[in-house]
Image (spheres, rainbow, N blue to C red):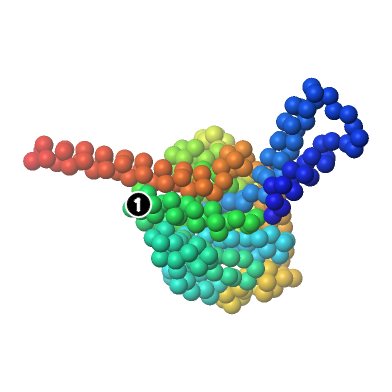
Amino acid sequence: MASDAKLSAAVTAKTRLPHQAVSPHRVGAAAVDQAEGLRRLLVCNQTRVITVVAGKSGVGRTSMTINLAAALARSGKDVLVLDENHAPNNLLDSVGLHARHDLLDVAQGKCKPREAVLSAKGFAVLPTARAMSALAKLKPAEQQRLESALTEVSAGMDIMLVDAAMLVGQAAVSSSLANGAALLVVVDATASGITESYALIKKLALENACLQFEIVVNKVVDAKAARIVFENMAKVARRNLAARLGYLGYIPLDDRLKRATQLGRSVVEAFPASVSAESYLELSQSLLRLPTQQDASEAGISNMVQSLIRHVSSSAQRRNVTRCKLEECITHRG
């Protein structure tokens, strides 16, 4: 990443022509133009966070995260993956990695942030499952270390992909609840897959004010079938929710993808000429072309973590109030 000084010099060079006289009245306007240009350049160089979610297990969320990370890396992007899921069969297991440390160890001061980051083929992985589960119980100093650690390890990264934990139960915690991340919903072409995916979208839209969801249809026979699935979901969402659904693409059924998963590798790396590898490369480019939302571009990793901590704290308070009311009711009846 270029330094602020170089970025500022680049903006200045584009803003001002050689030997051009600048009136005092134009100095202020030029400064504003330079500041805006610098802001745009810095925003373009921020780490973009994409949270991969699913309404039910078994639709291929973890496989989607691994293969998207590999495809983005193949495109020259530096990618960090956060694994929010506990073993077995989580992302770490899928790529054959074993973690000596994780984000919770960093938050508790047991290791440095970089010591918790693992190297997969083409991208980096940070285990965050235990930290997400313990987030509500962390002390303020531990929360601060967690926030600083994520800011540090994401520095210089183009993309941060999150293999998000399932939102099962009121106490479930996931980065999908934080502000500032793009939400990529993995859907399969089954009745239950569509129903559960819509239920997740409804929950995030109504309870977390999420307004934009990117849809990827997985394990589908062709583009036509994928479009039918998406249009059905989008139609219901338009009728009942303020949320907008965008069609990002689809991943076809492919035996090579299954074989790559068995080998603990991405299909992009193991079988680059396969139809699923080509689909993932196309999907990665579609992802990069998505417009950056205002709140996502200005939030940054630090503000995202803070919003997640606030959400967890407020949810815990609501649960405590509900429990106290229930206990009072039982006491009065007794």
Residue 321, position in %: x, y?
26, 39
Q: Position of residue 68 (x, y in %)?
A: 63, 61
Q: In the orientation shown, which residue stands out farthest toward the right?
A: 19
The vertical placement of 247 against 119, above or below, is above
Q: Residue furthest top?
A: 25
Q: Mark 1: give few (<14), some (14-19) or many (20+) Cα within 10 Å.
A: few
Q: Position of residue 323 (x, y in %)?
A: 23, 43
Q: Quadrant of the N terminus?
A: bottom right
Number of numbered discs visible in the structure rendering: 1
Which of 214/223 is in front?
214
Occupied quadrant, residue 36: top right
Residue to which mark 1 is pinned: 139
Residue 78: quarter of image: bottom right
Residue sitting nearer the eye, 319 or 60: 319
Asked whether residue 255 is in view, the answer is no
Q: In the visual, does 241 lie left or right of 32?
A: left
Q: Amino acid at mark 1?
A: Lys
The spot of residue 122 in percent (x, y) is 65, 68
**Residue displayed at 66% across by 44% down:** 43
Task: State whether residue 122 is above or below residue 54.
Answer: below
Question: In the depicted view, which residue is nearer to us: 109 or 255?
Answer: 109
Residue 203's image quarter?
Answer: top left
